[in-house]
Amino acid sequence: MSETRAAPEPLEVGLLLETVQSQQRLAGETLAQLGEQLQSLERGVRADVAQAAREAFLELSAEADAVSTQLLGLRRAIGMRAALWSAAAALASAAVTVLAVRLLVPSAAQIDALRVRRALFAADIRRLREYGGSVELRRCGAHGRLCVRVQRTGPVFGAHGDFLLVKAP
């Protein structure tokens, strides 16, 4: 069984070609519209991404400014704290120095009293020298007893002659 096909009629072929051309035109227009929509969508996405990036950058910039401000405040606080500690250390050092001077250095009244005592001692020393107080004293013997150099050729004194003249240097 073989079937024979009849050749299409020119009218059918013309209609078919017209339909194909119409479909091609519609497909081309649809592709052009799709291209335009794709470009419009791409522009919109790019604008949205750019806007989101701008907003994120502005937020990041604001946060960086806030952190910078906080760090500057912290720096000032640390500087103030360091200055206060330095001042406290200097004040404590000065207080210790003043206290040490007060405790160790005699007052003006004490210095005056010491000067009076020194003058009295100097007068006593002068008087002793005038009366022969410049004697040579030593520790003598096994027990380290105090002894004095005497003048053996001079006269003796006392009821038993037990006093001698001291030899002056």
Image: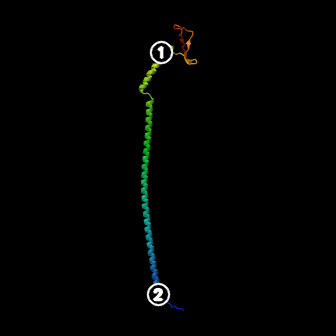
Give the secondary structure at mark 1. Answer: helix
Q: Nearer the viewer, residue 46 or 94?
A: 94
Q: Position of residue 106 (x, y in %)?
A: 44, 27
For the point 44% across and 37% down, which residue is it? 92
Q: Nearer the viewer, residue 24 or 125?
A: 125
Q: Amino acid at mark 1?
A: Arg
Residue underneath mark 2: 14
Quadrant into which the N terminus falls? bottom right
Give the secondary structure at mark 2. Answer: helix
Closest to the camera, between mark 2 and mark 1, is: 1
For the point 45% across and 72% down, which residue is it? 38
Kindly identify which numbered label has been placed on residue 127: 1
Q: Position of residue 140 (x, y in %)?
A: 57, 17
Say which quarter of the image contains residue 89: top left
For the point 42% across and 56% down, which residue is it? 63
Image check: 28 left or right of 145? Answer: left
Q: Amino acid at mark 2?
A: Gly
Can I make out residue 137 in this image?
no
Number of on-image labels:
2
Q: Nearer the viewer, residue 71 or 13?
A: 71
For the point 43% across and 65% down, which residue is it? 48
Which residue is situated farthest in the top direction here?
159
Circle 1 crowding by C-alpha within 10 Å: few under 14, some 14–19, many from 20: few
Q: Please, is residue 151 above or below residue 69 in the view?
A: above
Gap in angstroms between the C-alphas marked 2 and 1: 163 Å
Q: Please, is residue 151 above or below residue 18 in the view?
A: above
First along the sequence among labels 2 and 1: 2
